[in-house]
Image: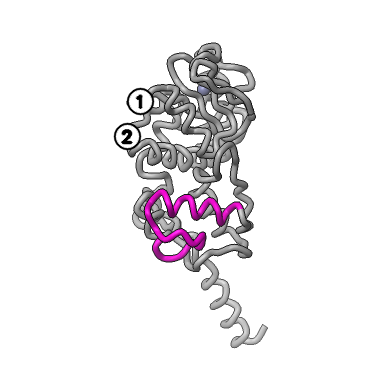
Amino acid sequence: MSNSSRRAFLTAAVAIPTTAAVVGLTGGTAQAAYSWSRTLKEGMRGADVTQLQIRVAGYPGYAAVLSTDGVFGAKTKAAVKRFQAAYKLTQDGVAGTNTFKKIYSLQSSDNTPIHFTYAELNKCNSSWGGGKVSASTAKANALRLMWKLEALRHALGDRAITISSGFRSVACNNRVKGSATSRHLYGDAADLTGVHSFCTMAKQSRYHGFANILGPGFPNHNDHVHLASGGSTWSAPNCGVSGR
Ligand SMILES: [Zn+2]
């Protein structure tokens, strides 16, 4: 390699990171939240589309789940429109300056939505280990779940939703006599309490991307609402609803 082509190669190599703004500021612990470097619209694809999908996955429409596959299709466009409607933005289904600005206003430096934290999604341990998936997968699942919870919280008038149980290791799950197939073992389930009635939360959650909803009338679910991204059972008989 000649000196000039080597120089060109090195310049290209350092110029690559543009969108993934996870930067150690001091001592390697500080973080900057994710940011986007281009407008995203239908037909585009990429890791930045996946990051957008994670943040609008709480707006898939009734009884639907949005795929976070990095492909900006019609369903992603519809989800972006619902997000825009929820926050009174122009509903064009294009993620540009105003949409990203709203997302940034809802996003903490560790990429969690502002009203939920990793700590409250894991009262079992601090490592996220010992479940049915790797610690990093469990934590990633919890992040996805939190953005759906943020959508639910906003739809219910921005009032408090409390997580009574989130991720569980097998040991933690056994201690609370959880089901051996519980989604809590994957980090993608949360049990909710808070100011709303359980039926209010169980019914509204149907609009925000939760495939598994268990509430009042379902065995052992009269004192909380259980929501998960994975699974397919929806049952809260005392709220007059059940099905898939
Ligand atoms: Zn649960």
Element assignment for label 1: strand
Depicted 81 relative to depicted 214: above or below:
below
Please provide the residue range marked out in magenta: 75-98
Circle number at residue 194: 1
* Residue at the disc numbered 2: 159
Query: Magenta segment: does it hold 54?
Result: no
| Residue 228, above or below 105 | above
Query: Does residue 93 appear to the left or right of 117 in the view shown?
Result: right
Residue 135 seen from this side: no
Disc 2 residue type? Arg
> Is the Cβ of the residue at disc 1 closer than 8 Å to that at disc 2?
yes
Which mark sits nearer the N-terminus, 1 or 2? Answer: 2
Q: CA distance from mark 1 to mark 2?
A: 9 Å
154 relative to 15, above or below: above
Q: Split into 4 quadrants, where in the image is the C terminus?
A: top right
Of residues 237 and 3, the one nearer the viewer is 237
Q: Amino acid at mark 1?
A: Gly
The residue lying at 51 percent from left, 45 percent from top is 59
